Image (cartoon, rainbow, N blue to C red):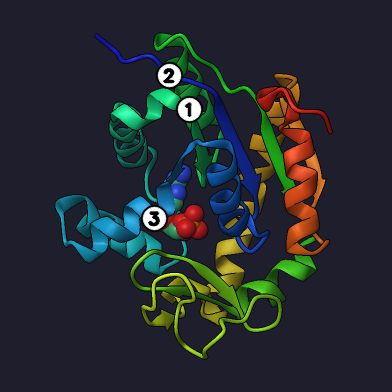
Amino acid sequence: MTASIGRVVVLLGAPGAGKGTQAQILSERLGLAHVATGDLFRAAVRDETPLGLTAKGYMDRGELVPDAVTIEMLLERLAKPDAAAGILLDGFPRNTAQAEVLDKALADKGGRVDIAPYIEVPEADLVARLGGRWICRAGGHPYHEQTKRPLKAGVCDVDGSELYQRTDDQPATVQARLRQQLGALDEVVAYYRGHGVLQTVDGRRGIEQVTADLLAALAPLTGSKG
Ligand code: AMP
């Protein structure tokens, strides 16, 4: 009754580490469904669904949405047909409890987390990066004032929609968000290291270099060399 599941990649990184940018590139290159819990929540908020109404307050304060709500949403997403070809998770799990639930859900479908690449960026760099981040309204495509400017100011290169700064990327919220999330990220990194699937990549390098390093880390999945 539970659909089977293909390869599972868990992309790890702090807010501002470049995870969203790399997730879009990697999911396309590797043919994996990109499942970003932050995007799912933002869509629910935009559509004013009951889930969105629950999530909004937490998101605006830069806090994690409670596990029960998040996990239910994620499991529903994993049950969709495109997950059978394999998924790239972005923004989940955010703590050990979520990691354990994920392992159990995947085991029920005959799967497991194959590789957990970790884009590592020092904390001081993260604050600066988050302050400059803009995303597009239509597709959530990320841009940055310093490192990834759109061709036309305020407009998404991919779909032409308006760029905006997320409420939780505004300076007062950034510090609070980092403080809460870095501790939990360390736990998740330790969890996957303990399971022998962690692959650390230096996130201070340029976008293309980080992509190349991630693809090398993921080579065992695709069967390609280095
Ligand atoms: P993100 O786009 O991944 O930075 O997520 C934006 C916001 O959505 C977070 O600050 C949380 O409020 C919420 N969120 C996303 N993923 C999770 C998760 N796995 N667990 C709890 N809250 C989450």
User: Mark 3 highlights which residue?
Assistant: 39
Seen at 66% across and 48% down, the residue is: 183
Label 3: how many residues lie within 10 Å, few (<14), some (14-19) or many (20+)?
A: some
Q: Are marks 1 and 2 in contact (CB under 8 Å)?
A: yes
Seen at 29% across and 13% down, the residue is: 2
How far across and down, in percent of the image, does residue 110 sit?
A: 46, 8
139, 127: nearer the viewer: 139
User: Mark 1 highlights which residue?
Assistant: 86
> Label 3 sits on what residue type?
Asp
Quarter where residue 136 is shown: bottom left
Separation of disc 1 and disc 3 at Cα? 18 Å
Seen at 24% across and 65% down, the residue is: 46
Q: Earlier in the sequence, mark 1 or mark 2?
A: 2
Badge 3 marks a residue whose secondary structure is helix
Most extreme residue toward the bottom is: 153
Q: Is residue 45 above or below residue 147?
A: above
Badge 1 marks a residue whose secondary structure is loop
Separation of disc 3 and disc 2 at Cα? 21 Å
Label 2: how many residues lie within 10 Å, few (<14), some (14-19) or many (20+)?
A: many
Q: Is residue 222 above or below residue 29?
A: above
Q: Is residue 86 above or below residue 40?
A: above
Label 1: how many residues lie within 10 Å, few (<14), some (14-19) or many (20+)?
A: many
